[in-house]
Amino acid sequence: MAVSIVQGALFVLTALEFYILTALILKRGWLAFLISLFVSTNLILLSYSKPIMTEGLSLWLLTTLVLCAVYFAKTLQVRVLWLLSICMLLLCFTRPEWSYFPILLYAYLFLLVIPRKDRRRLLPPILVSVIAIYALLGKVQFGRIVLDSLNSHSVSRLRAAKGLSRAAARSFAALRMTGLDLSVAADLSSSFEPCLRKLYCC
């Protein structure tokens, strides 16, 4: 219930930001209202607000990102650039397929949007933003690789221990079929115990 309320609030914020974005681009309030009304009544977008999915959060982050990019293109303020970088980082964490988008967006802003007289002033924060985003993404990805390798190693050791236990059970069954004394089986069982202990403790 709480998740649905939060996702519904994010959808309302998305519709409001879409109205502001359209008003900034078209500079006509009534046309921006009609377009935002059409977006807010879209059934496909509304369906994202009920289940526990990342689409609602991704939609809000993407809309906020575009709004920050348009506002930065109009004002060329560094604080808007930092807000743009935060939205970009959160979007990449939410949907990994956006990981290649920061380089393309910052290259577009630097080469085609920012005037030449302001490029020297805005180049350092753009470089810092790109380096910080990909450093954090690389750190998270490296952590995932380490955890996956540890989990796979633990699973392989558990499978090996289970395989040894099954082999021991088959050996005991063969001893029972041959009619050997139980003392032989007990000795064989005690000889298997250190191996099993070693596998489970590693």
Image (spheres, rainbow, N blue to C red):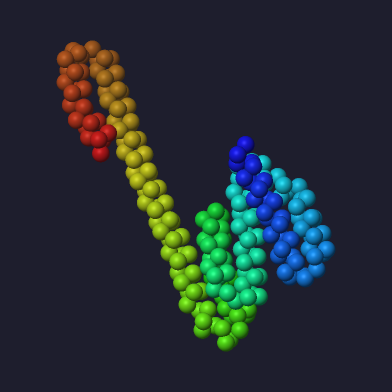
Q: In the rendered view, does 132 fall on the left or right side of 165?
A: right
Q: Quadrant of residue 2?
A: top right
Task: Locate the C terminus and report the quarter of the image it occupies.
Answer: top left
> Is 141 on the left or on the right of 84, as rendered?
left
Nearer to me, 174 or 19: 19
Comparing 128 with 107, the one in front is 128
Image location (x, y in percent) of residue 177: 28, 15
- Name the residue at 64% across, 41% down: 4
Q: Residue at x 62, y 36 (%)?
A: 1
In the rendered image, residue 44, in percent from the top left (x then y), is placed at 73, 48
Q: Residue at x 34, y 44 (%)?
A: 153
Left/right placement of residue 58 relative to residue 151 reads right
Which image quadrant is residue 163 in?
top left
Residue nearest the viewer, comparing 133 with 189? 133
Residue 186, compared with residue 75, is above or below; it is: above
Position above or below: 80 against 98:
below
